Image: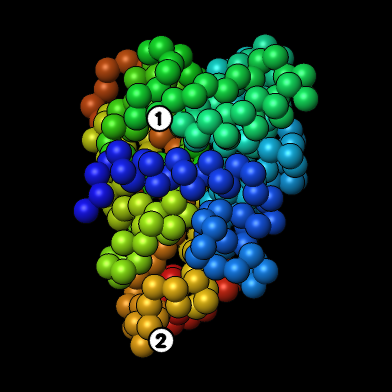
């Protein structure tokens, strides 16, 4: 079994390469993983369309997300926003539109190539209230009680110790602040050979944990008003699975009831000491059009 540091190295190396790839290539693979499927055979597997959001910058969109957290994040003018795993700056630039000139946006990423690309994008745009910091989101280079809002898009699933990240989110949020995070979770257990695939780890899938475990970690950290803002099933095409499974194993997987789900979760850090509670409200549930009855992905 790989250690946490070894898994982080896998992710860092993969995303260092992804930083130089096109959005079209990344969308056709599994969150940018370079070897899990052909870039010409499949439409976007996980990514949602940002192009209609105000503040969208095409050069910053690498097609690596699994949701639209900034669309749901309730960012207000003047807010300080932190984006976890900021990549080339996509969510940061959308957040900047919402915060306006009086706000501030901080992107954090532990891949130097991504930081370099994001800073170049910000310089080109002339944005002086968006900055990108190199660092691990398990130990954020940010002071306590800094952020009004935290967003993240398909990143926590890549982190081996998710409890540490959630604890850090609590630390850097101001009392009364909140987060909106899109991520990949599981319903049921993935086959072991998928969990062992390094490129699928870097591609968002095998680092995912069970949905109920994920939500419990948020609740246990003390966050309140936990809400599911969006859900959609993720369908992994046969040509991707064929890299790791036989035809019979794929058929069994389709019938197993195991699901891979993209969710966007919202929660608040209480403004004063409060007993942790959870309020799960499924506001919007979307099912991927390719998730057919009996496929096992729903």
Using residue 63 as the reference point, say whether residue 194 is left or right of it.
left
Quarter of the picture containing the C terminus is bottom left
Instruction: Please tell me whether residue 84 is drawn above or below residue 215 in the rendered image.
Output: above
Q: Residue at x 34, y 74 (%)?
A: 257
Q: Residue furthest bottom?
A: 248
Residue 97, quarter of picture: top right
* Quadrant in which residue 116 is drawn: top right
Q: Is residue 222 above or below residue 1?
A: above
Kindly identify the residue that appears in the image at 41 percent across and 34 percent down: 267
Q: Position of residue 271 (x, y in %)?
A: 37, 17
- Disc 2, SS: helix
Please report the residue visible at 51 percent of the width from the left and 62 percent of the height from the top: 35
| Of residues 146 and 159, the one drawn nearer to the viewer in this rendering | 159
Instruction: Write down the residue under mark 2.
Output: 247
Query: What x and y, as percent, mark residue 43?
Result: 65, 66
Residue 257 visible? The answer is yes
Q: Secondary structure at mark 1?
A: loop
The residue identified by callout 1 is: 137
Image-based side of 161 in relation to 42, left or right: left
Give the spatial CA distance, label 1 vs label 2. 39 Å
Kindly identify which numbered label has been placed on residue 210: none
Mark 1 in CB contact with mark 2 (< 8 angstroms): no
């Amino acid at each position: 079994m790989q250690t946490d540091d070894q898994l982080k190295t896998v992710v860092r190396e993969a995303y260092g390469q992804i930083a130089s790839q096109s959005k079209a290539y990344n969308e056709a693979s599994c969150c940018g993983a370079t070897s899990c499927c052909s870039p010409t055979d499949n439409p976007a597997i996980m990514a949602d369309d940002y192009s209609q959001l105000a503040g969208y910058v095409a050069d910053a969109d690498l097609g690596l997300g699994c949701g639209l957290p900034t669309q749901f994040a309730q960012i207000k003018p003047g807010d300080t926003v932190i984006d976890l795993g900021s990549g080339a700056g996509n969510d940061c630039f959308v957040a900047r539109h919402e915060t306006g000139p009086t706000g501030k946006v901080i992107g954090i990423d532990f891949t130097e190539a991504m930081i370099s690309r994001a800073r170049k994008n910000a310089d080109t745009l002339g944005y002086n209230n968006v900055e990108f910091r190199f660092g691990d989101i398990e130990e954020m280079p940010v002071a306590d009680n800094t952020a009004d809002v935290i967003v993240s898009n398909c990143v926590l699933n890549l982190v081996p110790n998710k409890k540490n990240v959630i604890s850090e989110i609590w630390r850097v949020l101001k009392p009364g602040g909140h987060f909106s995070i899109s991520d990949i979770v599981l319903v049921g257990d993935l086959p072991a050979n998928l969990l062992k695939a390094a490129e699928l780890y870097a591609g968002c899938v095998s680092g995912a944990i069970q949905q109920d475990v994920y939500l419990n970690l948020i609740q246990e950290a003390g966050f309140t008003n936990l809400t599911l803002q969006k859900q959609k099933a993720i369908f992994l095409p046969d040509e991707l699975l064929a890299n790791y499974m036989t035809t019979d194993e794929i058929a069994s997987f389709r019938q197993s009831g195991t699901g891979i789900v993209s969710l966007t979760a919202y929660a608040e850090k209480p403004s004063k000491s409060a007993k942790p509670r959870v309020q799960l409200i499924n506001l919007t549930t979307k099912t991927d059009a390719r998730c057919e009855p009996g496929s096992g992905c729903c």
